[in-house]
Amino acid sequence: MVSVKIYLKLGFDEKIFIKTYIKRASLKYQLIIRGKLMRIVLFSLALVSLNLLADGHEANESSDNQYMLLSTYEIASGQNPADLEKELVQLQLDQESYGFNDCGLYQHWYGGERAFYAYCYFSDFDQFESIRLKSEADDDRMAITQNYSNHTDHILELQKANLINAPDNLLWMKWKFGPYLTIIERQERVETLFDAFNRSFGGCSLYNHSWGPEIAHYMSCGFENFSDFGKKHDAINKILGEELATAKLDILEHSDDLLTLIQD
C-alpha cells in the first residue's frame, strides 16, 4: 500500500484524497488511517499554538518599546539627593499609571552630570498623547515640590535592544559625529562602535535622537560591579586596539556616565 504521506507530498488535494482513500480502504486500514490522521491534526494544532504564543511574546518584547523618554534632573547645590530621589520615585510610579510601558530611575555615580536619569518607554505617539491627557487630568501632580535645579527631556528612538533587563549598574554613552556626514554615514559609524561594545559587555542597547536638545546617538551597557567592569574594560580596549585603531570613525564628541539603579 502506498503511504498517504507520499500522495500528500506530490501535491494531491488533501481533503479529496483522504475521502476517496478511506472509502476504498478496508475497515482495518480505515481505523489505522483515521488514527494517524488524528495524531497528525493534534500535532499540527499543538505546533500552531506554540508558534502563536512565541510570536506574541516576541512581538511584546521587540515592538512595544519603540521610543524612550529620557529625562535628567540635576541635583541642586547643597541639596540632599535623597529628597529629590523620593520625589522622582513617585513621579516614575505616576508615569507608569498614566500609561507608559515601563519606567525606571538611575542616579549619577561617576561621570559628567550630577543628576538623576529617569526613563519611560512607549510604543508610538498616539500612546504618548493618551499619556499626556491622563497626566494633565491628574491635579495631584502639580502639588509635587520640584527639588531639582535643571531639567532636560529627550525622546529617543530605540534602534537595538540587547539589554533586556535594567542592570544594577549602567554605562550610559553619548556619541556625536562630524556634521559633514550624512545620516546614513553617522549610523554606519555608530553601528561599528556599537558592535564593539555589544560584544565586550555581552549585550547593549542603541538609541538615536528623535526629539530633544541635541542630535546624537546613545548606548547603554550593564555591569555587575567594578570587577566585572574591569573585565569589560579590557575586552573593549582589545577590540579598539586590534580592530578599530585605524578606523575612520569621525567622532566629534563623546561622554561616559556610570549610573546606579534606584528603581525599575
Image (cartoon, rainbow, N blue to C red):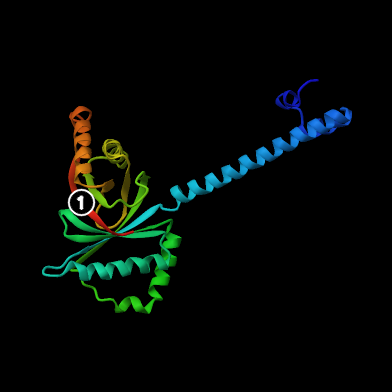
Relative to residue 258, is residue 237 depicted above or below?
above
Relative to residue 27, is residue 90 depicted above or below?
below
Q: How many marks?
A: 1
Find disc 1 in the rendering and name its residue: 258
Which of 80 and 146 lies nearest the eye of the viewer?
80
- At 32% from the left and 59% from the top, the residue drawn is 104
Relative to residue 243, is residue 115 depicted above or below?
below
Q: In this view, does 39 lie to the left or right of 186?
A: right
- At 20% from the left and 68% from the top, the residue drawn is 82
Q: Position of residue 89 (x, y in %)?
A: 30, 67
Q: Is residue 88 left or right of residue 11?
A: left
- Position of the N terminus, as image quadrant, is top right
Relative to residue 58, is residue 11 depicted above or below?
above
- At 83% from the left and 28% from the top, the residue drawn is 29
Q: Position of residue 110 (x, y in %)?
A: 16, 53
Q: From this viewpoint, is residue 179 visible?
A: no
Q: Where is residue 179 in the image (x, y as percent from the top left)?
A: 22, 44
Q: Position of residue 67 (x, y in %)?
A: 38, 54
Residue positioned most to the left: 78
Q: Residues within 10 Å of mark 1 (few under 14, many from 20)?
A: many
Q: Quadrant of residue 47?
A: top right
- Position of the C terminus, as image quadrant, is bottom left
Q: From this viewpoint, is residue 262 visible?
A: yes
What amino acid is at disc 1? Leu
